[in-house]
């Protein structure tokens, strides 16, 4: 916060320290001010909203219970959180509507009481400035996590003081402009939920064919899906044969004929798909029918090491992507062992089986990691279903609900491999899957662009708020009292005269608050 010089202040203003115009942490009321069982307002730190700067959830306690061990204040006092991170977050408020004019709260509050020359709301808006909070932060003392704003900092903090009538106009102007900003913010705050519902509706339309209805009529025929599904079934059987042949080789056993191939049993769809009616050109299939492998991570993962191969858990699947944030590691030698159960490949679809059930991500090129048992992996058949299409389907509300219900209602819900294999989903021809993916991506990109604009508007709103405060305390927000008095041909009480009057009145015992 830049320091004002006196000659930079508007006419009639004075630059004063907090202790010039405020009682800081005034004395507690005497114990006999009210009876012990008199109800008073109690304001714990969480009751002060850091965003609105209001006391939002006060408690009622008897006077005898809170008089000792807590900070005391009264109506029109300003309370200011001195401890980190509450101070930096903006926890401050004007105390209003206190029961019996008595308030008590956290010992981490600093209390400001006007001596009469400064309005509580004028002071409140001044200390809510980001510039003031940053200056206070730079002057904190104490250990990490327990840093506090010292009393001497606030005592010697300087504030530009206008004439009292001008303070009233400044406060009214700030609050009128803030009300408009709050209205804008409320509208912006509703956008994320609207976009969430928009994305869900897009996915729902993709699942039942509405998204590509006109496109399908022009480009798809009924026979196409049968040919496509037959190719998937063939590829699935070929993968099974290849995998079993590799097992024979690794075990040193070679079959003398192909009779072992007769053991292959193609999975069937025994589930009733009754979520909605599919287009005639689509079919319903289980995940097992279109996947060459459905597995999970090692059930007995090796010990962790400081460096090595990343070991990922459910928390590493976020926002439809694989992340390595805060992951642990296993040794390369141990990875050689666990990868026999699951070794990630490009386009594998990862699903979380605990926590937030059904979070998904697609493995991109060259990702090497060890998967926890709480991660399942779907490897779709080669040249089969589009991985992104399947991911979109599984993220639709219908399938998120199915997976959530399938995970059970225990304290630690778990989605099992058998449940994933049995999931029934719609399957369009590959060409339509690709068109669906293209359209969803375009619509989601549109939603993302709106979110970015909303985020920018929110940031601009907060900057406007700080700009309004900066103008207010430099005399640029409203017409000054000096200008009005000159235009009206009258005198006025400057801040200097105001301070002298208050000092004289207080000296005579006539305190004004």
Image (cartoon, helix red, strand yellow):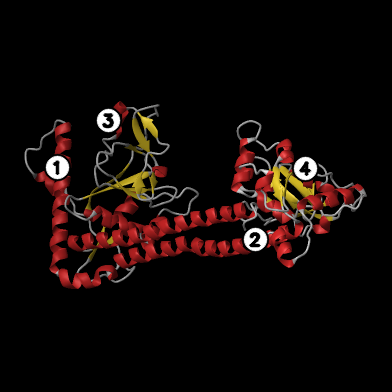
Q: Which of marks 2 and 1 is nearer the N terminus?
A: 1
The crowd level at tag 4 (other Cα within 10 Å; few <14, some 14-19, many 20+) is some
For mark 1, give the secondary structure.
helix
Q: Which of marks 4 and 2 is nearer the N terminus?
A: 4
Q: Earlier in the sequence, mark 1 or mark 4?
A: 4
The Cα atoms of the two marked residues, 1 and 4, are separated by: 84 Å
- Left or right placement of residue 56 versus residue 26 in this view: left
Q: Earlier in the sequence, mark 2 or mark 3?
A: 3
The crowd level at tag 1 (other Cα within 10 Å; few <14, some 14-19, many 20+) is few
Q: Residue at x 34, y 61 (%)?
A: 446
The Cα atoms of the two marked residues, 1 and 3, are separated by: 21 Å
The Cα atoms of the two marked residues, 2 and 1, are separated by: 81 Å
Q: Earlier in the sequence, mark 1 or mark 3?
A: 1
The Cα atoms of the two marked residues, 4 and 2, are separated by: 26 Å
Q: Which of marks 4 and 3 is nearer the N terminus?
A: 4
Q: Position of residue 161 (x, y in %)?
A: 72, 50
The crowd level at tag 2 (other Cα within 10 Å; few <14, some 14-19, many 20+) is some
Q: Where is residue 103 in the image (x, y as percent from the top left)?
A: 78, 52
Q: Where is residue 291 in the image (x, y as percent from the top left)?
A: 23, 51
**1 vs 4, front mark:** 4
Q: Do the residues labelled 1 and 4 touch (CB within 8 Å)?
A: no
Q: Name the residue under label 2.
A: 478
- Left or right placement of residue 186 versus residue 61 in this view: left
Q: Name the residue under label 1.
A: 242
Q: Name the residue under label 3.
A: 336
Q: Say whether residue 183 is visible.
A: yes
Q: Residue at x 66, y 40 (%)?
A: 83
Q: Which mark is residue 19?
A: 4
């Amino acid at each position: 916060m830049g320091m004002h010089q006196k000659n930079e202040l508007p006419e009639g203003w004075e630059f004063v320290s907090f202790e010039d115009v405020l009682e800081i942490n005034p004395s507690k009321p005497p114990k006999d001010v009210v009876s012990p069982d008199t109800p008073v307002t109690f304001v714990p730190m969480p009751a002060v909203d850091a965003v609105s700067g209001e006391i939002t959830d006060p408690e009622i306690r008897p006077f005898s219970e809170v008089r000792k061990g807590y900070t005391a204040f009264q109506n029109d006092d300003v309370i200011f959180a001195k401890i980190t991170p509450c101070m930096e977050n903006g926890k401050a408020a004007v105390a209003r509507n206190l029961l019996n004019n008595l308030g008590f709260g956290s010992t981490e509050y600093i209390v400001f009481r006007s001596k009469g020359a400064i309005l509580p709301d004028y002071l409140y808006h001044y200390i809510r400035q980001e510039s003031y909070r940053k200056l206070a932060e730079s002057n904190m003392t104490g250990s990490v996590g327990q840093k506090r704003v010292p009393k001497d900092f606030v005592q010697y903090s300087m504030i530009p003081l206008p004439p009292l009538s001008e303070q009233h106009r400044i406060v009214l102007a700030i609050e009128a402009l803030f009300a408009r900003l709050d209205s804008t913010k409320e509208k912006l705050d509703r956008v994320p939920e609207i976009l969430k519902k928009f994305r869900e509706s897009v996915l729902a339309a993709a699942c039942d064919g509405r998204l590509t209805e006109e496109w399908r009529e022009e480009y798809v025929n009924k026979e196409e899906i049968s040919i496509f599904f037959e190719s998937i079934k063939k590829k699935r059987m070929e993968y099974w044969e290849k995998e079993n042949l590799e097992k024979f080789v690794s075990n040193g056993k070679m079959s003398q004929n192909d009779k072992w191939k007769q053991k292959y049993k193609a999975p069937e769809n025994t589930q009733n798909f009754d979520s909605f009616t599919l287009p005639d050109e689509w079919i319903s299939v289980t995940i097992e029918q279109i996947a060459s492998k459905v597995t999970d991570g090692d059930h007995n993962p090796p010990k962790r090491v400081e460096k090595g191969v990343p070991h990922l858990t459910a928390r590493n699947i976020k926002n439809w992507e694989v992340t390595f944030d805060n992951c642990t590691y296993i040794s390369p030698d141990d990875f050689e062992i666990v990868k026999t159960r699951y070794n990630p490949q490009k386009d594998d679809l990862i699903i979380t089986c605990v926590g937030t059930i059904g979070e998904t991500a697609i493995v991109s090129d060259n990702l090497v990691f060890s998967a926890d048992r709480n991660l399942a992996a779907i490897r779709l058949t080669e040249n089969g279903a589009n991985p992104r299409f399947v991911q979109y389907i599984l993220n639709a509300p219908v399938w998120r609900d199915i997976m959530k219900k399938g995970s059970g209602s225990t304290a630690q819900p778990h989605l099992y491999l058998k449940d994933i294999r049995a999931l029934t989903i719609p399957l369009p021809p590959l060409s339509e899957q690709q068109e669906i993916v293209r359209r969803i991506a375009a619509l989601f990109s549109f939603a993302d662009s709106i979110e970015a604009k909303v985020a920018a508007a929110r940031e601009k709103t907060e900057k406007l708020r700080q700009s309004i405060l900066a103008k207010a305390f430099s005399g640029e927000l409203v017409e000054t009292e000096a200008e009005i008095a000159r235009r009206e041909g009258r005198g006025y009480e400057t801040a200097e005269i105001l301070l002298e009057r208050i000092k004289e009145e207080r000296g005579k015992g006539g305190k004004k608050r």
